[in-house]
Image: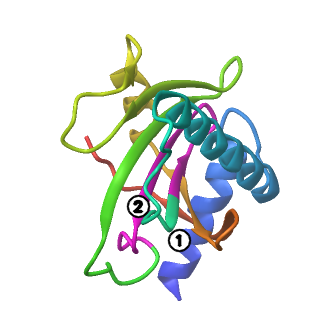
Amino acid sequence: MRTLGFCSMILICFSVCGEEYFSNDEIVSDSLEAVHLCLKEYSELFESGLSEEVDRVYVHFSPEVMGVIFTRGEAGSFGERSNNYRAFLSCGVSMSPSFQIYFLGSPSLEPLIELSGANDFDNALYSQAFRELMFVWDGDKFNFHDIKISSVSYQ
C-alpha cells in the first residue's frame, strides 16, 4: 500500500510539476505521431520498410523528447521478457518546436540519422521520470496497450 501511494505521488508530481501538463490521451496521440514519423523516415531510406517481425513499439515520453523502440516480443517493461525479444530500430524525436527526428538507428549498426547534440536529447529524456508506453501491432496498425511511469536512469 505504501508503494502504491508513493507511485501515485510520483505520477501526480510528474504530471503537475513538469514544464507542461499532458493528459494520457495527448501522450498517446503524440507518441503515435512519433511512431509514424519514425516509420515514414525509415521507409524513405529503405523501400522494404521495417521487418514484419516487429510486433511492438515502446515509447519513452517526456515533455520535450521521445525515445521510440521497435521490437519483436516483450522487452520486460510490462511483463516477463520474451525469449525471442529483439530490438530492431530506435528513433529519437524532439517535440520542440515541432516533431523532428534527432536519431534513427538499429542496434549494433552505425546510426542512419544522428543530429549534432543527440546525446543531449537522450540525457534530457533519461535524467528524470518519464512515461513508458507500449503499442502492439494488430495486423493493420499499432494500438495503444499500456502506459506507466518509469524513473529508471540509463546514464
Q: Give the quarter of the image for residue 34.
A: top right
Depth check: give the residue in front, 76 or 109.
109
Q: Residue furthest bottom?
A: 1
Please name the residue that numbered disc 1 is placed on. 6
Q: Main secondary structure of the magenta part?
A: strand
Question: In the rendering, at what x and y percent does residue 107 appear?
Answer: 25, 45
Against 39, residue 64 (above or below) is: above
Q: Is residue 98 above or below residue 13?
A: above
Pointer 2 or 1: first along the chain: 1
Magenta-drawn stretch contains 70: yes
Q: Is residue 17 left or right of residue 78?
A: right
> What's drawn in magenta, residue-wise?
58-77
| Farthest residue, direction front | 47
**Disc 2: which residue:** 71
CA gap between label 2 and label 1 equals: 31 Å
Residue at 35% from the left image edge and 52% from the top image edge: 88
* Percent x, y of residue 75: 36, 69
Inspect the image, locate mark 1, and give the three-letter code of the amino acid beneath it. Phe
